[in-house]
Structures are given as C-alpha cells and as structure tokens.
Image: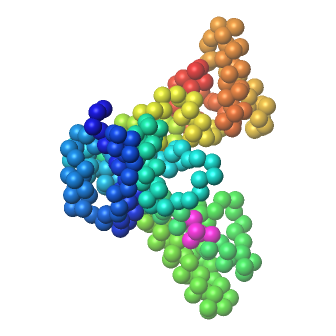
Amino acid sequence: MKGTRFVGLDVHAATIAVAVAEPTGEVRGMGTIPNEPEAIHKLMRRLGPAEQLRVCYEAGPCGYTLYWQLTRAGISCVVVAPTLIPVKPGDRVKTDRRDALMLARLARAGELEPIYVPDALDEAIRDLVRAREDAVCNQRQARQRLQALLLRNEIRYAGKTAWTAAHRRWIAHLKLPHPAQQIAFEEYVQAVEEVSARVLRLGASIQAQLEPWRWRPLVEALQALRGDDPCAASRIIRGNRFEVMASQELFALRQRLRMRVYLSDGSKRLARQREQMVADPQVDLADDEQRVRKEQIIRFVDRTGLRVFHWHHTAVGPGCGNRLKDIAQR
C-alpha cells in the first residue's frame, strides 16, 4: 500500500527500541522510548495516521498488552515468534536497535509469520492454567523432598503406588527416630498438604471460569481424549492455536497421545498392539482400501509413538472411539 510505514519494535520491560521502514526504501532507527502507554501513543501519532502504520514486535515475557493497546487505537499490529524470524548465517551481533531494524525490514518484505494472539479473557484463563501448572510442579517437588528424606533414613513404603489414600495414612503414622528429623519430616508433610490443597483450589477455579469462556465446548470435547479432567483439556488449549490445526493427525502428533490397548493375554508388546489395532473389525473398509488404510495407520503409529488404538469408548473417555477412528481413517 502506498504510503505505508512498517514499524519494528523491540519490546522490553522498561523500554522499547523503535525502527521504521519507509515506503521509499529507507530503514532508520527512531531511538528508544519508555514502555508506557502515553509514550507509545505519542510515538504512533508522530509516525502518521493509524491506517498507514503496520507495527510488529516479537512475542516475549511482556505479553500482549502492547498489541491490545495498538489494535484498540486502530493500528494494524502483528506479533511474531522469535524462532520464526529469518536470520542471516553468521549474524550474531544482537542489540535492541538492530533487532528493531530487522523487524521493520522483514515486515516490509512480508517475511514475518504472525502468531495467534489471544483476547483478554483467553489470556486470563491461560494465566489461571499456568498458575495451576506451577502448583502441580511445586507439588511434585514437595513430594520428592519428602520421599528423599524418608529414603535417607531407610524408611520405605511397602505398597505399590505412592500418594494414594493408603500411602497418606502410612505417612501420617510415621515417627522418625530423632526430634530434629521429626521436625523436618512434619514440615515436609505440611508443605505437601499445602501445595496439594492449592492444586485443588486452582482446579476448581478453572472449572468455574470455563462457563462463560468461548472455548468451553472445545474443552468439553477434548475431555474425551484427555479424560474427565477439564484442567488437562484447558492446558491443551493454552498451548495451541486450533484454527490452524485442521489435520487431526497433526493434532495427535503434537499431543503425543498415549492410549492403552486391552489384549486378552495382557501383553503390551508393540507388535501385538499393532496387530490388535489393524485387525479391529470396526475399521469397516473395502479390502484394497482397508489394506492401504492399515498401512497408513501403522506408519502413523511408528512415526508418532502412538502405541494403541482401542475403539471402545471406555478406553480414554466417552465419545473417543469415533474421534480416534476419524484420525486413523485420514
């Protein structure tokens, strides 16, 4: 478009480096401004009318507040992934000014691939999901510290599975030989209980916030693949752009689905799993087409590490059989 100016921004917590690619071919730096709404608004007014500006910046820890501010002002803005920005071999000098100049130049050349930017509600739900993921990580670490203390003192649980109700009752009755060790043990136990309660609270909060969310039907549908936990389905949505995931095979590949197969003899060898999958009578296709489809399924299993297909819906959740069959028949 004639008269369009491409603006590259290198965004940091306190400052923003600015560069502009002019329609005439010149690319020049505009210095550095504070990362404040007033300074950004003043810069955009100085650069020209909103309809003639095309702004871009790298995704980073500052989030999407700048994107939302510019789009509200009627300015076209895109956010690009740093890993998708073309870089010249050997170009290792990296400064704020050079990054802004590069962004402006590439934007004018049309070589930048924008990423999906969530709206404010999407980002709020994602923050809540991130908080639960952090709590789950803290829970795992707290449990590991407690188990390490018990292991150092040769205290071993005789049961099969840890952190079940029976395992928790066993922990509650433990007494360590030295008072100092007992104090440390009780602190570790309290830490596990506190972070476990936090995980439950955040999970309940996620479920409560799903009702007005536009992705709620998708969360409910994904529970067929991820079980009955809405937090797991929400976590998938947090990390993916579903508008571009038209291929169900790509979806399964990215999520690294691991599904169980129920064999009569209990064997879980890969060859038997593949045999069970291919011989499934519910794959109702013509002989030649069925052979081709079966070969495609085997290649898909080997390529993605997807160990099983069991069409029965109870294997991984209600309604999953039809979804998996659709994936396999692509």
Left or right of 41 on screen, residue 148 = right
> Which residue is located at x 77 percent, y 31 percent?
272
- Answer whether residue 270 is visible to the viewer in this image: yes
Helix, strand or loop for the magenta stretch, by majority:
helix
Quarter of the image where one finds residue 16 = bottom left
Residue 13 image position (x, y, % from top left)? 38, 65
Residue 172 sits above or below residue 162 on the image: below
Left or right of 301 on screen, residue 71 = left
> Which residue is located at x 36 percent, y 36 percent?
217
Task: Compare residues 82 and 190 and report the one nearer the observer.
Answer: 82
> Which residue is located at x 51 percent, y 75 percent?
191
Residue 213 sits above or below residue 142 on the image: above
Left or right of 261 on screen, residue 143 = left
Task: Compare residues 173 and 261 and report the one nearer the observer.
Answer: 261
- Answer whether residue 72 is visible to the viewer in this image: no
Is residue 75 located in the magenta-colored stretch of the structure?
no
The N terminus appears in which quarter of the rendering?
top left
Quarter of the image where one finds residue 30 = bottom left
Q: Which residues are magenta?
A: 139-144
Residue 223 image position (x, y, % from top left)? 47, 40
Residue 37 image position (x, y, % from top left)? 24, 60
Residue 57 image position (x, y, % from top left)? 39, 50
Residue 319 sits above or below residue 158 on the image: above
Task: Compare residues 119 and 202 and report the one nearer the observer.
Answer: 119
The C terminus appears in which quarter of the rendering?
top right
> Which residue is located at x 21 percent, y 61 percent?
38
Task: Compare residues 105 and 264 and report the one nearer the observer.
Answer: 105
Is residue 140 located in the magenta-colored stretch of the structure?
yes
